[in-house]
Image (cartoon, rainbow, N blue to C red):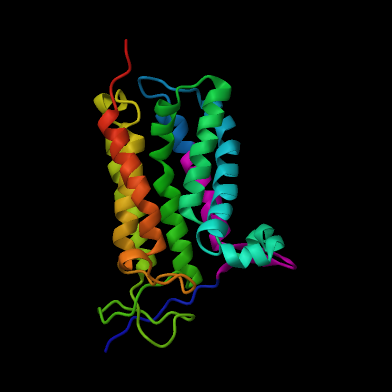
Amino acid sequence: MLVLPFPAIDPVLVEVGPFAIRWYALAYILGIVLGWWLAKRLVALAPRVATAEQVDDAVTWITLGIVLGGRLGYVLFYRPEHYLANPLEIFAVWTGGMSFHGGALGVILAILLFCRNRGIDTLGFGDRVVSVVPIGLFLGRLANFVNGELWGRVSDVPWAMVFPTGGPEPRHPSQLYQASMEGVLLFLLLQLLVRIPAIRARRGFVSGAFLAGYAVARSVGELFRQPDANLGFLIGGATMGQLLSLPMLLVGLWLMLRARPAAA
C-alpha cells in the first residue's frame, strides 16, 4: 500500500543556547498578530463598535484568556486526575497541553470583562473579534502537524501517513483536515458574513455562526482524529472534542436565532 512519507520538520524553528522558538509558539504569536491587524479594520465597519486603540487594549485581555483558559481547559477536560496528583505541573505550559474549548471560554470571559470595563457593546465587538479567530486555528493545526501530534485514526486512504509517534500503521493526517475546516473554510464563511451590512446589524449573529461553525467542523474532524489515549471513546462512541462542541453548537444556534438589529 502506498503511504505518504511524513515530512520530518524540526519542531524547533530557532535554537540559541538554552532558548528555543518552536513552530507551535510561533503559530500562537502569528495568529494573535494577524488577528489583531484584521480586527482593527473590522471594528471600523458600520456600525462602528470600537476604535483601533480599543482593539489594541483588548489584545492583552484576549491573549490572557487564550493562555489561561486553554491551559485550565486542558487540565479540567482532559487530564484532571493527573494534575490533581501533580498540581505544580499545571504551570508547566512548555510541556504542551492546551484545549481550544477552554481557550474559547477564556476569550469569551475576557471580551465580556473588557467590554464591560470600557463600555463597549459586547455582541457587536465579539462579532468582529471571532471572525478572525480561524487564523489562529489554521496556524495551530499546522503546528500540530509539524509536531507530529494529534494524528488521525488508522486508514488506508492514499494520502495516509506514518507518524513518528503513531506506531507503524498509516493514519489520516487529521491535523490538515482540521486546518482546512476550522481554519480556511470557517474563516471564509465568517469573513463573508461580517462584511454584509445586514448581518453586521444583527448583533451576535456572527458570534453564533462562529460557535456553531466551529462545533460542526470540530465534530466532523474528530471522526478522523485518534481520540486521546487517556480518554478514548466516551458516551455513545463520541470523543471529548465532540462532547465539548455540543454546547457550542447549541449556544451558537441560539445566538443566531435571537440576533436582531439594534434599535435605532
In the rendered structure, does residue 26 fall within the stretch colored magenta?
Answer: yes
Relative to the observer, which residue lies in front, 214 or 8?
214
Check the image and report above or below for 166 versus 36. below
- 156 left or right of 126 in image: left
Check the image and report above or below for 3 versus 9. below
Q: Quadrant of the C terminus?
A: top left
Q: From this viewpoint, which residue is outermost toward the top?
A: 264
| Residue 28 visible to the viewer | yes
Residue 28, horizontal then vertical, whole percent: 53, 52
Quadrant of residue 129 within the rendered picture: top left
Q: From this viewpoint, which residue is outermost toward the front?
A: 235
Residue drawn at (51%, 70%) of the image: 147
In the rendered structure, does residue 94 fall within the stretch colored magenta?
Answer: no
Residue 85, horizontal then vertical, whole percent: 67, 67
Residue drawn at (35%, 20%) of the image: 46
- 173 left or right of 89 in image: left
Residue drawn at (36%, 36%) of the image: 207
Residue 133, horizontal then vertical, whole percent: 43, 44
Region of the chain picked out in magenta, as a range: 11-36
